[in-house]
């Protein structure tokens, strides 16, 4: 059925279909719901005399002279006027046919950005058309701008969307939600028309994502209701699966109890008790454990794993990076003491020979706990008796990957229990929706003896003095992380920043005393750098955010984060959590540009004032409002078309109630909604 409807529209052939598919558009409904990412106001012609540099305006002009130049670079310059004043139109890319068309006397309608050059006002590469005598240059509505695949222009996509709205039978295709939610006071067809072609007086900010225009709210609420209905169905479906009860307490449990060097906190004991209660049932546990950095989630995971293995089953422990998988592997082996030989590591770095042996060991049950990265769900990895999956930092995995791991259980009869760990604090209202198919436990207590980390802000102008202070501290046994700025999503640029700081710090500390850690190093070299830092061969470790999770050096006591204003609050909090893990007093210094904005300053102050991850998350939500605290990938669920669960959190509770009523009273309507908005991908959240 996919794509058949698209081909019914004039102008859509196989190559256009392929391009639309690449943007998630497979049918007429997808076209209707492909909303504008911005708007242009072409509803009024502005006279040249009234133009201001920086404006984006519609003008009608007559070409006075047209000149094609080829030095210093190829360009075509049209000197134009509308009678009120002169303006130049400049093109750097043009065809000979355009040069012939745009000659003296031609009348044009142009829309573009106005700039000021030494020759006066100009527009560079405006959108233009020849003036049509019987046609007004002014548009009746704001002009929508869409994200489009290469090869499909704005005019084409506008035409396709308009045709799709006219062709779809809205009476049959769209659903009566107003019956369940009276606040939906605009029907879906009117909402789509208002968003695709807003009236001239519409406030553009109001109708874009995050705005409160009734059309925007109408679509957003419907998507939220569909999402919440999907999660409600999912939770009910999970209860229909069978799982093996895990009730034995034997040698694996005893080893953890004996080898864990601290007394469990009350919070850890409470969470373990909740896990035991869940895993004793014959339905799969779906539990999320949220715990701040350093709260002791790994030992909770180890005790859960012990429960499964003592009950004669296997456990898969999945971590998002090789570095983190290796750290967990080392920790778990130390917890399991005598049983450590039955704990194995599987990552992309495992040799072919080692992998072959390990797969055989898993198959014959001589390995009971496998720690690994995405390598755990590669072809050929099968568990004959998998009863528990532990996933660390779930949001870092794609939903498809988690689903693939869940299907690794060779048993057709039972589904494994699932325990998810996260140090990303999520405000309560969000977690009720984002993890609606899970029960949530919170480790809200740090182990005793931890001293609070002294956090301070320092402008970059104080960097030299700071280095001198750290140099003195390392002489007295201190160890420091130096985190380099996140330039942008580019490993090469981030690598440059690290290497620059590495070279600078080597001059102060000497080559032997400075280590360097970044994403381009091999797993072996990363481990070597961490080991040297751990063994105090180096006293300062320059790094990218690769240390954000999992690197555990208990006596590291200084953390410097350069250009801290560029990082998210949650990430700064995670990085800070790498220190203060021992009994020494620890210091975190947030280095920032000498001049930063008020919001950046407020955000950094939050880190100085509190070490409570949940308070930090709530504050971040309050300060940034429509910020991407979690992002599409971090929700751990499916990406949503219009809804940002953080920005739009005020609608969460209302839509949740409506969704539950619809699931109870009209399951068919709930299914239609889910199909419209989520198209089956909600099943992935089951992973």
Image: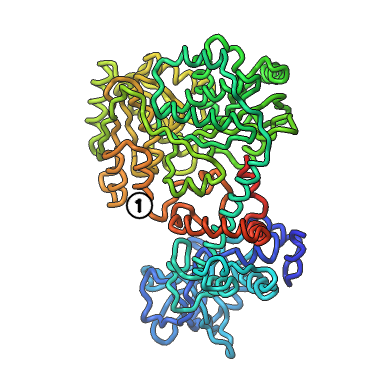
Residue 419, relative to residue 585: is it above or below?
below
x, y percentage for residue 535? 40, 13
From this viewpoint, which residue is outermost toward the top?
A: 338
Q: Residue at x 66, y 26 (%)?
A: 386
x, y percentage for residue 441? 47, 36
Colouring method of the image: rainbow
Q: Residue at x 65, y 68 (%)?
A: 174
From this viewpoint, which residue is outermost toward the bottom?
A: 134
Mark 1 secondary-structure assignment:
helix
Left or right of 590, for residue 676:
right
Q: Nearer the viewer, residue 167 or 169?
A: 169
x, y percentage for residue 267? 41, 29
Left or right of 47, for residue 100:
right
Q: How many marks?
A: 1
Few, some or many residues within 10 Å of mark 1 (<14, 14–19, 20+): few
Q: Is residue 280 visible?
A: yes
Q: Nearer the viewer, residue 295 or 48?
A: 295
x, y percentage for residue 356? 71, 19
Q: Which residue is mark 1?
A: 622
Q: Nearer the viewer, residue 440 or 61?
A: 440
Q: Nearer the viewer, residue 568 or 183?
A: 183
Tell me the quadrant of the picture where the C terminus can be found.
top right
Specify the quadrant of the image occupied by residue 283.
top right
Q: Residue at x 51, y 37 (%)?
A: 288
Specify the quadrant of the image occupied by residue 362.
top right
Q: Is residue 25 visible?
A: no
Residue 61, relative to residue 153: is it above or below?
below
Left or right of 284, for residue 525:
left
Specify the quadrant of the image occupied by residue 673.
bottom right
Residue 503, relative to residue 677: is it above or below?
above
Q: Residue at x 72, y 61 (%)?
A: 17
Tell me the quadrant of the picture where the N terminus can be found.
bottom right
């Amino acid at each position: 059925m996919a794509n058949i409807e698209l081909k019914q529209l004039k102008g859509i052939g196989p190559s256009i279909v392929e391009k639309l598919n690449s943007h998630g558009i497979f049918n007429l409904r997808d076209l209707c719901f492909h909303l504008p990412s911005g708007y242009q106001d072409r509803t009024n012609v502005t006279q040249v005399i009234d133009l201001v540099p920086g404006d984006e305006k519609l003008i009608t002009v007559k070409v006075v002279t047209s000149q094609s130049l080829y030095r210093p670079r190829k360009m075509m310059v049209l000197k134009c006027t509308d009678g009120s004043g002169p303006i130049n139109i400049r093109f750097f890319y043009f065809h000979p046919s355009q040069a012939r068309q745009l000659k003296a006397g031609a009348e044009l309608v142009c829309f573009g950005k106005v700039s000021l050059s030494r020759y006066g006002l100009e527009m560079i590469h405006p959108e233009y058309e020849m003036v049509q005598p019987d046609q007004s240059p002014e548009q009746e509505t704001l002009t929508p701008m869409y994200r489009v695949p290469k090869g499909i222009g704005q005019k084409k996509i506008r035409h396709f969307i308009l045709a799709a709205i006219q062709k779809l039978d809205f009476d049959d295709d769209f659903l009566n939600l107003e019956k369940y939610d009276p606040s939906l006071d605009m029907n879906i067809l009117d909402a789509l028309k208002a968003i695709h072609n807003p009236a001239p007086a519409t406030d553009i900010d109001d109708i874009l994502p995050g705005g409160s225009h009734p059309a925007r709210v109408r679509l957003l609420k419907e998507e939220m209701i569909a999402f919440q209905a999907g999660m409600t169905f999912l939770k009910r479906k999970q209860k229909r699966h069978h799982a093996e009860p895990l009730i034995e307490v034997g040698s694996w449990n005893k080893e953890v109890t004996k080898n864990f060097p601290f007394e469990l906190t009350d919070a850890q004991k409470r969470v373990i008790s909740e896990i035991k209660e869940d895993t004793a049932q014959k339905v799969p546990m779906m539990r999320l454990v949220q715990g701040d950095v350093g709260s002791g989630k790994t030992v909770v995971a180890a005790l859960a794993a012990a429960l499964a293995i003592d009950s004669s089953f296997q456990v898969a422990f999945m971590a998002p990076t090789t570095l983190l998988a290796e750290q967990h592997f080392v920790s778990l082996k130390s917890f399991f003491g005598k049983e450590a030989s039955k704990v194995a590591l599987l990552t992309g770095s495992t040799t072919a020979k080692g992998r072959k042996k390990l797969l055989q060991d898993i198959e014959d049950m001589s390995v009971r706990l496998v720690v690994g990265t995405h390598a755990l769900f590669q072809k050929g990895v099968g568990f004959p008796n998998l009863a528990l999956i532990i996933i660390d930092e779930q949001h870092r995995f794609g939903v498809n990957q988690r689903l693939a791991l869940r299907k690794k259980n060779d048993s057709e009869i039972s589904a494994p229990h699932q325990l998810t760990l996260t140090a990303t604090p999520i405000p309560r209202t969000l977690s009720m929706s984002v993890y609606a198919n899970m029960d949530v436990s919170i480790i809200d207590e740090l182990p005793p003896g931890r001293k609070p980390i002294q956090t301070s802000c320092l402008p970059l102008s104080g960097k030299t003095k700071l280095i001198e202070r750290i140099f003195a501290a390392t002489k007295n046994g201190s160890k420091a992380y130096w985190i380099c700025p996140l330039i942008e999503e580019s490993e090469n640029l981030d690598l440059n920043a690290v290497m620059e700081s590495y070279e600078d710090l080597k001059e102060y500390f000497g080559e032997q005393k400075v280590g360097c850690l970044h994403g381009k190093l091999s797993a072996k070299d990363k481990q070597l750098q961490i080991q040297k830092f751990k063994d105090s061969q180096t006293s300062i470790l320059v790094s990218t955010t690769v240390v954000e999770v999992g690197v555990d050096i208990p006596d590291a006591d200084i953390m410097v984060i350069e250009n801290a204003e560029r990082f998210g609050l949650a990430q700064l909090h995670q990085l800070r959590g790498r220190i203060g893990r021992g009994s020494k007093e620890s210091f975190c210094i947030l280095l920032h540009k000498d001049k930063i904005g008020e919001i950046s300053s407020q955000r950094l102050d939050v880190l100085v004032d509190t070490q409570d991850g949940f308070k930090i998350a709530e504050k971040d939500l309050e300060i940034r409002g429509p910020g991407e605290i979690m992002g599409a990938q971090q929700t751990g669920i499916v990406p949503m078309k219009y809804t940002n669960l953080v920005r739009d959190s005020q609608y969460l509770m209302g839509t949740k109630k409506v969704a539950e009523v619809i699931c109870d009273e009209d399951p068919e309507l709930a299914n239609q909604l889910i199909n419209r908005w989520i198209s089956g991908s909600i099943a992935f959240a089951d992973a």
